[in-house]
């Protein structure tokens, strides 16, 4: 029963509200009609009766203005949509760039740490090898104890040169013992080549000396100056190379200390 009473009460309130709203709308419509009638009929209470052509023209102009404003509003709305899409795209690009930068930054840091650790391990190995080399060097050459040790990298030419030296020693031994062997044959060929080279150098020296003797004093002075500049340039290159090597050694030593 209580629920039924509440429902009836709700319907009564809605009916009263609709009736009140309808009466207000009817009154407003009546007032508007009276106002239009006074304006068109030239009511003496109004300051001036409106011209129908002027009203039509104003309505037309108002319609065009409304259309123009509507089109402008549509353009603004489209521009706003484009701006929103561009802003979203820019935000996505910025986010992707930040993510990529973070990933690259982490990769660089990890790679740098890895290289730093490898460098530390290599320096430890070099230090251990250097200490062992120093001990063995000082034990084998006591008169050179504490002196700097210079390490020279070898290549295939050094290996070939070492093999040629061993073959030369074996060839000399076989030649002394009158043993025919590949090493002794190689030694004979090498000796003949060295004799020929010495003879050629001697002949070349003789030719150069004859050429110098045939020069006048002025030509000889010019030649000597050119030769001095040439060999001074070679000396400067050697000095620069030595200074560069010293700088590299000092830098390596400083890195090792760190």
Image (tube, helix red, strand yellow):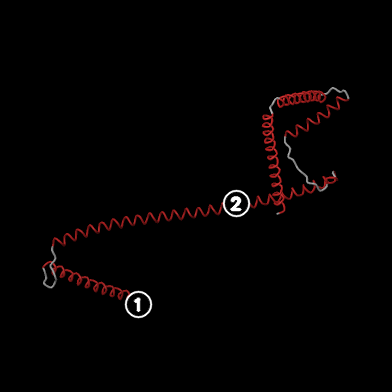
Q: Which residue is mark 1?
A: 2
Estimate how packed mark 2 is, as few (under 14), some (14 to 19) or many (20 or more) residues with alpha carbons within 10 Å: few
224 or 204: which is nearer to us?
224
**Mark drawn on residue 111:** none
Place of residue 61 in the rendered image (x, y in percent of width and height, measured from the top left) = 20, 59
> How far is mark 2 from mark 1, CA to CA?
77 Å
Place of residue 7 in the rendered image (x, y in percent of width and height, measured from the top left) = 32, 74
The quarter of the rendered structure image containing the C terminus is bottom right
Between discs 2 and 1, the one toward the N terminus: 1
Residue 96 versus residue 27 in the image, above or below: above
* Residue in the picture at 74% in, 40% down: 152
* Residue in the picture at 35% in, 55% down: 79
Residue 193 versus residue 138 in the image, above or below: above
Estimate how packed mark 1 is, as few (under 14), some (14 to 19) or many (20 or more) residues with alpha carbons within 10 Å: few
Residue that sits furthest to the front in the current view: 217
Number of labels in the image equals 2
Q: Are marks 2 and 1 in contact (CB under 8 Å)?
A: no
Element at label 2: helix
185 left or right of 102 in image:
right
* Residue in the picture at 35% in, 77% down: 2
Place of residue 111 in the rendered image (x, y in percent of width and height, measured from the top left) = 62, 50
The quarter of the rendered structure image containing the N terminus is bottom left
Kindly indicate the quadrant of the structure image that contains residue 149.
Answer: top right
Kindly indicate the quadrant of the structure image that contains residue 50.
Answer: bottom left
116 or 156: which is nearer to us?
156
Element at label 1: helix
Kindly indicate the quadrant of the structure image that contains residue 196.
Answer: top right
48 or 39: which is nearer to us?
48
19 or 139: which is nearer to us?
139
Q: Which residue is mark 2?
A: 108
């Amino acid at each position: 029963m209580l629920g039924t009473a509440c429902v009836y009460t709700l319907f009564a309130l809605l009916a009263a509200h609709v009736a009140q709203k309808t009466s207000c709308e009817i009154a407003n419509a009546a007032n508007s009609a009276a106002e239009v009638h006074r304006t068109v009929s030239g009511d003496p209470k109004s300051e001036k009766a409106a011209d129908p052509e002027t009203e039509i023209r104003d309505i037309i102009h108002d319609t065009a203005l409304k259309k123009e404003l509507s089109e402008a509003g549509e353009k603004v709305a489209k521009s706003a949509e484009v701006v929103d899409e561009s802003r979203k795209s820019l935000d996505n690009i910025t986010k992707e760039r930040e993510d990529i930068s973070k990933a690259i930054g982490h990769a660089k840091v990890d790679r740098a740490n890895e290289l730093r650790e490898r460098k530390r391990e290599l320096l430890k190995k070099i230090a251990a090898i250097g200490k062992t080399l120093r001990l063995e060097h000082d034990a084998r050459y006591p008169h050179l104890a504490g002196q700097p040790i210079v390490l020279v990298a070898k290549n295939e030419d050094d290996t070939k040169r070492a093999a040629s030296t061993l073959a030369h020693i074996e060839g000399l031994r076989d030649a002394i013992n009158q043993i025919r062997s590949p090493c002794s044959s190689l030694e004979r060929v090498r000796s003949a080549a060295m004799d020929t080279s010495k003879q050629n150098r001697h002949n070349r020296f003789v030719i150069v000396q004859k050429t110098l003797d045939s020069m006048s004093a002025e030509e000889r002075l010019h030649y000597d100056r050119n030769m001095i500049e040439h060999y001074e340039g070679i000396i400067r290159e050697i000095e620069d190379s030595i200074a560069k090597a010293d700088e590299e050694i000092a830098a390596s030593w400083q890195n090792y200390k760190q």
